[in-house]
Image: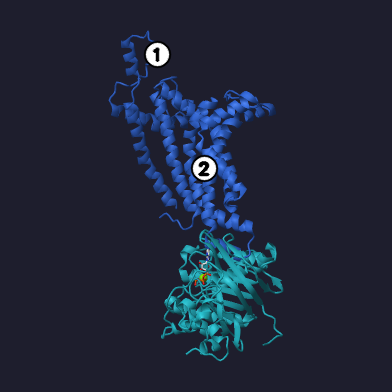
Amino acid sequence: MAEDISPVLSVKDLKVVFSTRKGEVHAVNTINFDLNSGELLGVVGESGSGKSVTMMSLLGLLPSPPARINGGTVSFEGKDLLKVNPKEIRKIRGGEIGFIFQDPMTSLNPVFSVGFQIMEPLKKHMGLTGRKAQDRALELLDLVGIPDPKKRFKDYPHQFSGGMRQRVMIAIALACDPKLLIADEPTTALDVTIQAQILELVRDLRKKLGMAIIWITHDLGVIAGIATRVIVMYAGQIVEQANVEELFANPQHPYTKALIGTIPAVRGERAKRLNSIRGQAPTTLREPHFCSFHPRCDFAFDKCTSINPQLIEQRKNHLVACHLFEDKGVTVG
Amino acid sequence: MFNYTIRRTLLAIPTLFFISLVLFLLLDLAPGDPTAQLPLTIPPEVREKIRLALGLGEPFHIRFLLWLEQFFINEPLHLLTELTGVDFSGDRQRVISWQSRSPVMDIVVQRLPQTLWVVGMSYVIGTIIALPIGIISAYRQYSWFDQIGTFVSMVGFSIPTFFTGVLLIVIFSVHLGWFPSIYDTTHVVTDWSSLIVQIKQMIMPTMVLALYNAAQISRFMRASMLDNLNQDYVRTARAKGLRENVVLLVHVLRNSMIPVVTVIAIGVPTVFGGAIITEQVFKVNGLGQLLITAIQANDIPMVQTLTFIFAVLIVLFNLLADILYGILDPRIRYE
Ligand SMILES: Nc1ncnc2c1ncn2[C@@H]1O[C@H](COP(=O)(O)OP(=O)(O)OP(=O)(O)O)[C@@H](O)[C@H]1O
Ligand SMILES: [Mg+2]
């Protein structure tokens, strides 16, 4: 472990609950991870596993109520983002941390021009005004591959296709050269060629700016292509975390194995949604005292129904939360 | 947009023509005799002559065409004469009130200021109060502010204005003696003290109507804000690091105003209708009161003209609402 580089972002024991009519939903349960500068952390897990909620909670972007952060720390540049005052978190949002949201169709304001929406963070964080802000915005539109930016600048979101709106979202997130970019399924609305362009662009920027990136996706093929490290989430918890080569070569958790088993043979075909694994993702109405995956696991045994497994380092830099590996040496067929 | 406006305006012409025909028909069918209020000593033959002189002997379509000519040709020409001083109208017949034997439009013009002051002012005040209340209620949903706002607006639009009007008169005129219970139309503002008298006599009727309008508009504003506060773009705005008041007053408000502006615009003519009752209660002799007395006296030309003016207002403000909608919402393009 390189101890000399302190991580850009360090999340410890993060818990998020939602108050609903049915009771408290424990959407994020004791999440721990670090992120170093220049690293691209891939986050995978099926729908409802808490990927978006985890990332939004880092910046306090969840609506509360119903959401409540139930403990934990998020250190970013020596500050705990969960404790800083509103003014400071606003400086970080859009400035040092850029966020691309999952749904490009609804994430832009319909009544303002795309140009206006890109210039907003530029005015706010970089103090750019007038001509300068406009030039930078045009540059960004060009960067994300919007053809003829000058002409599209004054257009409204409804005049853009889903993929182009997604790129506008990316431009907004990148506007102020953030140190950390959180991208929540940024390429799902894009076709394959554009997806490839965007991935290329992100790879470039990462190298050029040394930006750290968190990349949420359903597409393991994308993860394999760009991530340096991968987190696998299940029911609000991290079940496995490893470097990308290690994870694909040596998946440990039965859930990860099932996931990797679902990658389609032909690359480029949209990856199947992950819920082709037998059974359904659980809703977590209680803090689990068992392994959330056990009802769907072929290897579950009695311990799995009574104790929630901890995330422990199984091999070097390879963490797994599964009872099967607590006594070292046990391997799953 | 421009073409759309022109087209809609042109479409309004047949609509208004049809409305005027229906109004004319309805008033023609209504029972009543314009000579009923004349002294009983007038013999029946003379009465009949009076009726013929009023044009009532003609068949329906002739009377309607005459009215059309008087209202749409003679009246505008007369107005032109008044404005320019050049004689356009000659001795063309204007629409004459059966009651006072003077031109209907002259009376309307006399009464208009009172109505505009009281009703117009109340609508403006109501809107100005309603918008911030709606915005804050939505932003602080279920807070005590919101709860009180909800209660007051329930009261505001469930209690009719003739009740709140009388209630205010009992409290502030009879018991406290702060404000006059009757609106003095002859009062002229010349200096500070007479201005204060004017304000005092306007307060109660204005407030009664303002409460009623504010109740409705604030509810609407709140609902519209709540709709938009849950949208994804609000989260995007926050993720840019924008201050909460920018998120609220630029991003959310701009979207929320789209339906609210249309409701406000469409509400303007209905306010004139609602004012009829309030004008009665406070004895404001504006258009509302004019209409009531004209109905009682069977003054058909006056009733026809006033109801038609209301119809014009409704059509006009509907058109205005549509145009505003198109301006505020870039997604709407009228081709
Ligand atoms: N507003 C809310 N109220 C109640 N529960 C919520 C709310 N938002 C999210 N959740 C719960 O949090 C859990 C995690 O949701 P999240 O959106 O993070 O999933 P995800 O992993 O991003 O899924 P997807 O891949 O579909 O985007 C879900 O089980 C969901 O039921
Ligand atoms: Mg998500």
Indicate the chain on which mark 2 is placed. B
The chain assigned the colour blue in the figure is B
Residue matched to label 2: B216
Task: Give the amino acid type for the residue marked by disc 1 in the picture.
Answer: Leu
The colour scheme of the drawn protein is: by chain
Instruction: Kindly state the secondary structure of the residue where label 1 is placed.
Output: loop
- Where A176 falls versus B247 (above or below)? below
Count residues near mark 2 (Cα–Cα under 10 Å), then give few for <14, some for 14-19, many for 20+: many
Task: Give the amino acid type for the residue marked by disc 2 in the picture.
Answer: Gln
Image location (x, y in percent) of residue A65: 58, 59
Taking the view exactly as shown, the residue that stands out farthest to the bottom is A329
Question: Is residue B11 left or right of A200 when viewed as pictured?
Answer: left
Image location (x, y in percent) of residue A132: 64, 67
Q: Disc 2 and disc 1: Cα gap in Å?
A: 44 Å
Label 2 C-beta lies within 8 Å of the nearest ligand 1 atom: no
Image location (x, y in percent) of residue A148: 50, 71
Q: Residue at x 54, y 88 (%)?
A: A245
